């Protein structure tokens, strides 16, 4: 398949390497021209995925329109807050290519747009697939989610993910499942797009909470308890917004939560570690100086406002919000959680 990936962060770069390994024709389109030239010259994404070589047959494009000619699957690997703007640029380029080709291969060849984003849009609270369906009208949209550390995927280490599709035929979904899978990357299918996206978005918040717990050196018992109750809270929120609790207990929810809440490479956990050990100012300073986006920082604000309006019980989310946005101490949050009314599990 001809696959174009928009966004050359760690995950977009790793997906390009993986799909090349699967035998697909891959074009990677960084946001900045200078970044594209650097990757094309060095065959390495030194900023986001250092010490990983790019195969020579991965195309690195500095212009979007040529990369969309004959494109069958368009993957969005940008931060969730940049998705709508990126989708609009893609739509304009698709229209331009279609006009020049007078209804040629690109117009009829695009089979699906897939988002790798994990977050919701501020203000609208729309999920990534919902944003794509607004901006790329008539194009089937899907999402891939799960415990996907970019360096491990790029290295060909084993992983399982879930692909959920909206507006696509079962045949297209099955085709993409087969083309994206190999002996180290297993793709499962799901019809619960909302549940898959909500699980992948919410886990960032609770990975921050786990980091706070570890930063305060509260111990393994506390972390295990927190992760378990986080999963219950994620399920409640997902159900309130149209997802399935069983989906959240799968790869996109529990799987991603376990990885992000315990692994040293997790940006969200690392942010939480600083919150718990060094305080808000240090954590924010590190985040602002870093090259990678801490999605949980933005997700906390977005979900807090929406969950409160829905009346969903989310005490862990409320505590993370209090620490980040109300400047409450982590000790205050722990006390608030531990002195809540007692109840059955």
Image (cartoon, rainbow, N blue to C red):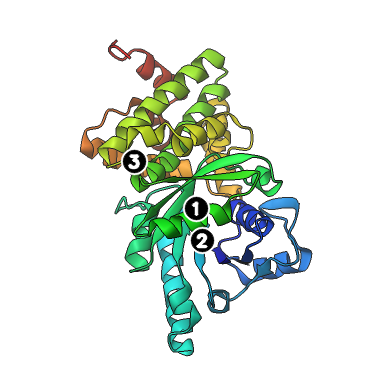
x 63%, y 58%: residue: 16
Residues packed near mark 3 inside 10 Å, few (<14), some (14 to 19) or many (20 plus): many
- Callout 3: SS: helix
Nearer to us: label 3 or label 1: 1
Q: Is residue 153 left or right of residue 311?
A: right
Determine which residue is flagged by label 1.
116
Q: Which image quarter: residue 322?
A: top left
Regarding mark 1 in the picture, which secondary structure is present there? loop
Q: Do labels 1 and 2 touch, CB within 8 Å?
A: yes
Q: Is residue 343 above or below residue 124?
A: above
Q: Is residue 292 visible?
A: yes
Q: Which residue is mark 3?
A: 303
User: Looking at this view, is 58 or 335 the one in front?
Assistant: 58
Frontmost residue, 148 versus 319: 148
Residue that numbered label 2 is attached to: 75
Q: Residue furthest front?
A: 171
Task: Mark yes or no: residue 93 visible.
Answer: no
Q: Residue at x 59, y 42 (%)?
A: 286
At label 2, counting other C-alpha atoms closer than 10 Å, the crowd grade (few under 14, some 14-19, many 20 or more) is many
Left or right: residue 318 versus residue 258 is left
> Do the numbered discs 3 and 2 sit on residues whose CB atoms are within 8 Å?
no
């Amino acid at each position: 398949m001809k696959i174009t990936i928009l966004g050359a962060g760690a995950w977009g770069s790793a997906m390009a390497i993986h799909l090349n390994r699967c035998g697909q024709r891959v074009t990677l389109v960084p946001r900045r021209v200078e970044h594209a030239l650097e990757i094309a010259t060095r065959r390495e994404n030194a900023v986001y995925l250092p010490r990983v070589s790019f195969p020579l047959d991965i195309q690195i494009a500095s212009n979007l329109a040529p990369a969309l000619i004959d494109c069958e699957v368009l993957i969005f690997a940008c931060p969730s807050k940049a998705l709508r703007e990126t989708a609009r640029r893609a739509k304009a380029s698709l229209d331009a290519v279609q006009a020049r080709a007078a209804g040629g291969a690109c117009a009829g060849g695009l089979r699906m747009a897939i988002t790798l984003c994990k977050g919701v849009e501020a203000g609208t609270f729309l999920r990534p697939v919902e944003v794509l369906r607004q901006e790329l009208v008539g194009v089937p949209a899907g999402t891939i989610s799960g415990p996907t550390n970019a360096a491990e995927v790029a290295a060909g280490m084993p992983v399982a993910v879930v692909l959920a599709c909206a507006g696509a035929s079962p045949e297209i979904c099955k085709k993409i499942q087969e083309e994206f899978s190999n002996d180290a990357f297993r793709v499962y299918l799901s019809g619960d797009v909302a549940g898959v996206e909500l699980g992948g978005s919410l886990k960032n918040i609770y990975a921050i909470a786990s980091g706070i717990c570890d930063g305060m050196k509260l111990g393994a018992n506390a972390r295990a308890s927190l992760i378990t109750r986080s999963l219950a809270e994620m399920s409640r929120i997902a159900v309130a917004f149209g997802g399935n609790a069983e989906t959240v207990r799968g790869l996109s929810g529990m799987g991603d939560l376990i990885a992000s809440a315990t692994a040293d490479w997790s940006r969200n956990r690392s942010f939480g570690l600083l919150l718990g050990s060094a305080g808000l100012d240090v954590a924010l300073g590190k985040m602002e100086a870093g090259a990678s986006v801490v999605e949980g920082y933005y997700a906390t604000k977005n979900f807090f406002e929406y969950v409160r309006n829905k009346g969903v019980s989310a005490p862990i989310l409320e505590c993370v919000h209090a620490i980040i946005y109300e400047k409450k101490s982590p000790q205050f949050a722990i006390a608030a959680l531990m002195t809540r009314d007692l109840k059955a599990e």
